Image (cartoon, rainbow, N blue to C red):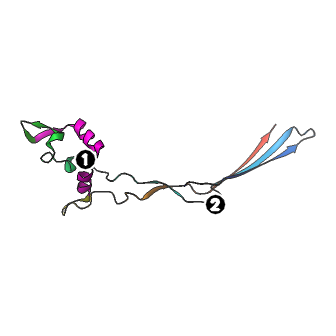
Amino acid sequence: MFSQTDFGVTHRYRLGKDNRFSLVANMNVLNLWNQDKVLTLQVSKSNGDVLPGAIPCATFPQFYTLVAGSCTGADINFVPLINAYNRGELFDTINTYLAGTPTAKNRSLATYGQPNRFQGPRSVTFGLSFQF
């Protein structure tokens, strides 16, 4: 839950014979109690290109446009791939790829699921103006 307490004070001093002039002083404090709440978490599992290694042509030929019936030079066919992803059919395959192999360990970001944005620190501003 996000909460923040702000505080502001303004005072006007009247000047002149007919109080026509004013000197206005103000102070604003944002995040008065200096709360440090987590606002967002890292939601990207990988900063790399997951697709070529995670969805190999030989295992999933339905997601490729094969050249002469072979995976050599095959292009990815994105429509069935995105549909399968949206149905959740590739979840385990992609997570297995991100977990790595003995030679390419842990392809996922170490910061996944960690806080990456926090509430701003306390800030105080003062103002002084002359009005006529």
Q: Which residues are magenta?
A: 72-98
Is 34 part of what is drawn in magenta? no
Q: Residue at x 23, y 40 (%)?
A: 81
Q: Which residue is mark 2?
A: 33
Q: Residue at x 89, y 40 (%)?
A: 19
For marks 2 and 1 on the same chain, the one whose residue lies earlier in the sequence: 2
Q: Residue at x 11, y 37 (%)?
A: 66
Pointer 2 local density, CA inside 10 Å: few below 14, some 14–19, many at least 20 = few
User: Residue 62's quadrant in the figure?
Assistant: top left
Q: Is residue 68 left or right of residue 119?
A: left
In the picture, the quarter occupied by the N terminus is bottom right
Q: Nearer the viewer, residue 46 or 78?
A: 78
Q: Which residue is mark 1?
A: 89
Judged from the image, the secondary structure of the residue bearing numbered disc 2 is: loop
Judged from the image, the secondary structure of the residue bearing numbered disc 1 is: loop
Q: CA distance from mark 2 to mark 1?
A: 47 Å
Which secondary structure dominates the residues rendered in magenta?
helix
> What numbered label is drawn on residue 31?
none
